[in-house]
């Protein structure tokens, strides 16, 4: 595919005018062709106008029609797999196997939401029939369900060029809900974004959708990104990235005359607690699994285990084993130089803190985009006295905290901010002694992992990928799995409407045969 280096403005292409940039191969450090042209305010206005027009049509499309559209996007991404993988490996330094796996995940998410739409019960239809004879006041007929909010802006993630980007989970769930999507492409993998956006555009045309149902802009997040969030047409935002970036978007959205929700996934250190019995019985196996999780993808996962808390006898030997295994992990290129530099800066800050010692550090080439595994150590008392020790080091680094007893572990757990995950390695005997720990962690994290590791995020109905702030902007939902669809919807009630004016999901005869709650009973 010949890449053009321009934005997608409905069915047309942008012409730039606000500067240009190039992707940089993180392995070689060389700039890549073509140059990508940044758009200005005129293009922001154009895509928002198109999205507003598209919403009037798209919100009324049936679940089956939208399902066909999502499957078409997945099919077109499949068709372009070789072009996607080739460009993605060069832009990101990720191995081919990881790229293909992420492509499969991306298409799987699209098809999962298609199946959800075909079944139809996700709208949570509820019907309460009227009772005109109720005294002293007659009861009205009330019927409600989830409805789409309007155009959604999706910011592509740097660390997932497919699964959390142009046709990733935020886009899939927004489209599934009936909302047009405007994508803000990420500057580190613009070519990958262009190829995937091409697949989406082909699907738009094949399915006869309004051209404004999908657009994608290149440009600075601080300029067009902020402009998109502030635009009155936009009704919600999906974001995966840094805490600073997420907070900036949240502030912009809150400052609007009509504030809108920002579903931001930001930062987490995903604590792993190793209890005494588990350490005694399988310490070596836990160490091996932990280091594998820590170094997976050069530590560039939002679920990377950045904090390890160990208690009981044998902690010193466990720390030595962790350090030894981490020291054997080869350094590798991080996704781009900005991430690599931020990682090195975070390490320097953490290593200079009082009470922190370096247990292992894999050397990297000066001036490169490489990231090497690092294991730091501290005692629980020191960790509790310095809240900054709990800050994220985005990369293959962890802080191992030694806890003398249950009280120290509970104090560490209570001190933590909101997390995406919290992991516990334990035996049944451990849980009898440390029973309060699970209850504390439930308040702190969106997903609790038992005797496993947090880096794998299964795409399924039961998954929760979210958590209390600052892991996310709102811990009441998930960005992975079918329930992500409700982030871009709102509840609407129809009171005393005639059947002919009701959505099919709420009509008396239930023509779509979906599951509903009628007069308090599920049927």
Image (tube, rainbow, N blue to C red):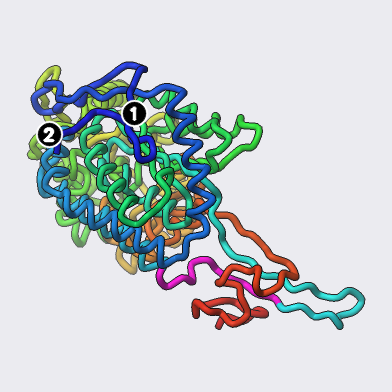
- Residue 385, image quadrant: top left
Per the rendering, the mark at residue 90 is 2
Mark 2 and mark 1 lie on one chain; the one further toward the N terminus is: 1
Percent x, y of residue 491: 61, 59
Q: Is residue 307 magenta?
A: no
- Residue 219, image quadrant: top left
Percent x, y of residue 484: 44, 56
**Above or below, comparing residue 207 to residue 135 in the picture:** above
Is residue 133 toward the left or the right of residue 25 in the image? Answer: right
Q: Residue at x 42, y 49 (%)?
A: 210
Pointer 1 residue: 14
Percent x, y of residue 254: 59, 34
**Above or below, comparing residue 247 to residue 135 in the picture:** above
Numbered disc 2: secondary structure: helix
Identify the magenta region. 118-128
Percent x, y of residue 503: 59, 68
Is residue 82 toward the left or the right of residue 383 in the image? Answer: left
Quarter the N terminus occupies: top left
Q: For mark 1, does the 10 Å Cα neighbourhood hold few (<14), some (14 to 19), or many (20 or more) residues?
A: many
Considering depth in this image, is 77 or 304 the residue closer to the camera? Answer: 77
Numbered disc 1: secondary structure: loop
């Amino acid at each position: 595919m010949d890449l053009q280096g321009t934005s997608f403005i409905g069915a047309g292409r942008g012409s730039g005018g606000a500067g240009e940039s190039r992707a940089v191969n993180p392995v070689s450090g060389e700039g890549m062709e073509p140059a990508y042209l940044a758009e200005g305010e005129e293009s922001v206005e154009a895509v928002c106008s198109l999205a507003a027009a598209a919403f009037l049509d798209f919100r009324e499309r049936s679940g089956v029609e939208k399902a066909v559209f999502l499957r078409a996007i997945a099919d077109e991404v499949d068709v372009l797999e070789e072009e996607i993988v080739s460009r993605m490996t060069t832009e990101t330094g990720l191995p081919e196997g990881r790229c293909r796996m992420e492509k499969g995940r991306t298409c799987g998410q699209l098809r999962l939401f298609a199946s959800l739409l075909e079944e139809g019960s996700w709208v949570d239809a509820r019907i309460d029939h009227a009772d005109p004879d109720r005294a002293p006041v007659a009861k009205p007929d009330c019927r409600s369900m989830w409805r789409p909010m309007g155009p959604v802006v999706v910011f592509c993630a740097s660390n997932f060029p497919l699964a959390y980007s142009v046709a990733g989970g935020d886009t899939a769930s927004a489209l599934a809900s009936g909302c047009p999507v405007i994508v803000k492409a990420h500057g580190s993998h613009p070519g990958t974004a262009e190829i995937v956006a091409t697949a989406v555009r082909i699907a738009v045309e094949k399915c006869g959708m309004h051209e404004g149902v999908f657009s994608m802009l290149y440009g600075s997040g601080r300029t067009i990104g902020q402009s998109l969030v502030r635009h009155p047409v936009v009704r919600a935002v999906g974001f995966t990235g840094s805490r600073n970036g997420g907070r900036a978007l949240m502030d912009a959205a809150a400052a609007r005359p009509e504030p809108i929700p920002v579903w931001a996934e930001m930062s987490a250190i995903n604590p792993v607690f190793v209890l005494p019995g588990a350490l005694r019985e399988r310490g070596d196996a836990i160490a091996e699994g932990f280091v594998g999780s820590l170094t997976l993808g050069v530590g560039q996962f939002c679920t990377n285990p950045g904090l390890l808390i160990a208690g009981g006898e044998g902690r010193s030997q466990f720390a030595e084993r962790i350090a030894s295994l981490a020291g054997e992990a080869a350094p590798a290129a991080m996704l781009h130089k900005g991430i690599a530099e931020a990682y090195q800066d975070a390490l320097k800050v953490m290593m200079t803190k009082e009470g922190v010692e370096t247990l292992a550090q894999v050397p990297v080439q000066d001036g490169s985009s490489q990231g090497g595994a690092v294991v730091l150590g501290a005692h629980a008392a020191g960790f509790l006295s310095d809240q900054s020790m709990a800050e994220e080091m985005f990369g293959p680094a962890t802080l191992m905290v030694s806890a003398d007893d249950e009280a120290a572990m509970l104090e560490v757990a209570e001190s933590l901010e909101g997390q995406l995950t919290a992991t516990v390695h334990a035996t049944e005997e451990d849980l009898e002694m440390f029973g309060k720990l699970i209850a504390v962690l439930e308040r702190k994290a969106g997903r609790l992992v038992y005797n496993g590791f947090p880096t794998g995020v299964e795409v399924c109905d039961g998954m929760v990928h979210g958590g209390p702030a600052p892991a996310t902007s709102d811990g009441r939902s998930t960005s992975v799995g079918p329930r992500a669809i409700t982030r871009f919807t709102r509840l609407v009630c129809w009171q005393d409407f005639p059947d002919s004016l009701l959505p099919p999901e709420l009509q008396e005869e239930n023509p779509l045969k979906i599951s509903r709650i009628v007069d308090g009973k599920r049927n």
